[in-house]
Image (cartoon, rainbow, N blue to C red):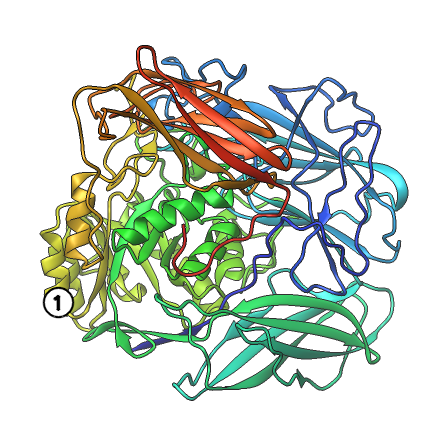
Amino acid sequence: MLALMLTVPLVVPFTTDSVSADAIPATATATATATGRPVSGANQFRTVTDFDAGWLFNYGDASGAGAASYDDGGWRKVSVPHDWSIEGENPPAGPFSQSAASTGRGGYLPSGIGWYRKHFSLVGVPAARKVYIDFDGVMADAGVYVNGTLIGTHPYGATSFRYDITSAAKFGGTDNVIAVKTDTSRQPASRFYTGAGIYRDVRLIATDPVHIDQWATHVTTPNVTGSAATVHAQTTVINSGGTAASVSVQGVLSDPGGPVLPGTATGQKTVAAGASATFTYDIPVTNPELWDLESPNLYSLATKVDVGGITVDDDITSVGIRSLTFSPSTGMSLNGHSVKFQGVAIHQDYHGLGTAAPQRAVQRRLAQLKALGVNAIRTAHEPPSPAFLDLTDRMGFLVLDEFFDVWTQHKYSDVGDYATYFDRSAASPTGTPAVPGASGPAPWYQVDTTGTVLRDRNHPSVAMWSAGNEIRDPLSTRTSLLSRIVSISHALDPARPVTQALFRPGDNGDVTGATRTALDVFGGNYRPDDVIKAMGMSPVRPGLFTEMGTATSSWTTVRNNPGVTGEFLWTGVDYLGEADGLWPTVGSTAGLMDAVGTVRPIGYSWQTTWGAPRTPPPATGTAASQVLLAPDHPTVSTDVDDISYVKATVADSAGRVVTGSSAAVAFTISGPGVIVAVDSGSQTQESFRGTVRKAYQGVAYALVRATGAGSITVTASVNGLASGTTGLTGTTVPFVPCASSCD
């Protein structure tokens, strides 16, 4: 039996204006771009600065744009996360084209090169500090320059990376320039829309030369009972200075309510210049508040580095105390209670927002899925953002964290997907720690597996790893590759199991071959009989239906087989892409909900099957007479992580939605607010920018963000109907993610 007792690293909200010790001040440059804001979250000795604001963007290639002296005065000001493909070249003009190189697989959306530049200052940062830049995800083939020096390249758009920019940076008040080239020219890049640009968060980190290494802290919670638990932490401290240092580590745990528990300190170790050392410690917890699906309690662990008795660095980790076990006879148990994955697979696009979704939009989607009884998410078919996992931790979901959609063989005849790089030797610096067991350069798939496991292994919501989705390599190739992926995963995260979303496992030799014994949990797509057969062979394995259609009949099989840990439906929400040859259709309509969250009848059927509280569909009418307007949140912030979905309903005189209406809805806004996008559940090509969107089944949305504090008025008009008006309150208060039940 595999026993999992897991925890989670803190993803700090990048939204505060508070200033911590050694903060990098926000300073203006000649182009009025800002350094960024220090990130809150209890770091007192290292500086973690939100680097999302103040970027400049150019659509298309720009010769010499990596140089510090390049004239970027004509570039457009943007904040990241930013997806330039969903906008298109000339917003609000429609971005879709039947002749797009991405084809219908990529949603007929544009691809190519986009450049970003940002000016910043390190005023107030001592020259002895180490400075790093953290990217949570850049789509794709990123090239990063600092003051004209190429720092590194990173091909996979779904994995995070960090570069040491100390030697290229200029300390003091001198202007620094970071430039990032993004390139999605290799098309079609996938079978679904993947976005383009710096579409996830960016941070600037300044540390003492003696500091905790990248993703080095690993926290587990063995020996969990109702009355006691142990928080076990291991971390690696690196000495980047010029002399040896006498180093010790101390851990301080705060419970979910805030009180601090007694700290624990390790003994001292001498760490030579250029070397590293590993430290471990345990913190006992009496009467722990456990993390589970209903009450996702999170502790906070500060791991501090002392040199000669003086604290010089700290690493902040959110901790979810819980046990998760897998058994071939009883399936999955959370904190000693049997639980099944009531799961959906989802891609990471948010329709009109593309892949650069604010946290509020992600939170809204997760809350809508939870209302249908969903308790688990499969990240199809690539690792999610850290910000996504922060929300699944807070809201009480289990996550199947998937590594790849392809290995060495392209899907179909594509030439642009990750198979191009999978087995290619990774360029140095890779942006991630060393691959376990590797001597010399490692291939990119090992680098990206290492980075994903290290980055995500502490999240209590992450229940299992998936090595890949419907991999088309022959069994002779897959066997050795799978063995290496599993060995890396186990080396870095010994307890958490590895599965795979296998393609026709009975036909392709996986049931009787080495795949079955290499995987900890046998997974398969659309072939439940193959999974059950593999489970019953010796040695036995738990099983998982990694992908099934939306027919509720499959749940009977899950319920009647204790060793089956659950299933993931295809799919939870409609998505862009996988529409090749279907123009003007640009996306799939296979979801329990449409792309903006309107629940389909099959969604309500699953709500009943999974025993969730019933939420009946809205009443419908036939004779439209008015537009009703309502925001999902009456208060909206200037924070880029916040957004309000203002819903326009084409309704009859009794307020019932007229689902037959596809009328054009024109939105206007006044006061300190802006319409970021217009949207609906339609998968027919139509611009998401501007102020007009056709209703889909009687509904359209204006997505609104505040530009300042004050009253915002939104109006929606349809020819021949009474207009609707609603008010919102704009605020400058940062967005704070919710916990447990929300939205």
The quarter holding residue 70 reads top right
Looking at the figure, which quarter contains the N terminus? bottom left
Q: State left or right for residue 653 relative to residue 685.
A: left
Q: Is residue 193 depicted above or below 690 in this figure? A: below
| Quarter of the view holding residue 317 | bottom right
Residue 406 vs residue 295, the one in the foreground: 295
**Residue 81 point in image, percent of width and height:** 57, 38
Q: Residue at x 51, y 28 (%)?
A: 713
**Residue at left offset 27%, top offset 76%:** 337
In-image side of 643 versus 77 (left or right): left
The kind of residue on which mark 1 rests is: Asn
Please state the horizontal and vertical placement of residue 704, each as a whole percent of the image. 50, 32
SS for dot 1 = loop
The answer to whether residue 185 is seen in the rendering is no
Q: Is residue 23 left or right of residue 383?
A: right
Whether 571 is drawn above or below 389: the answer is above
Residue at numbered disc 1: 561
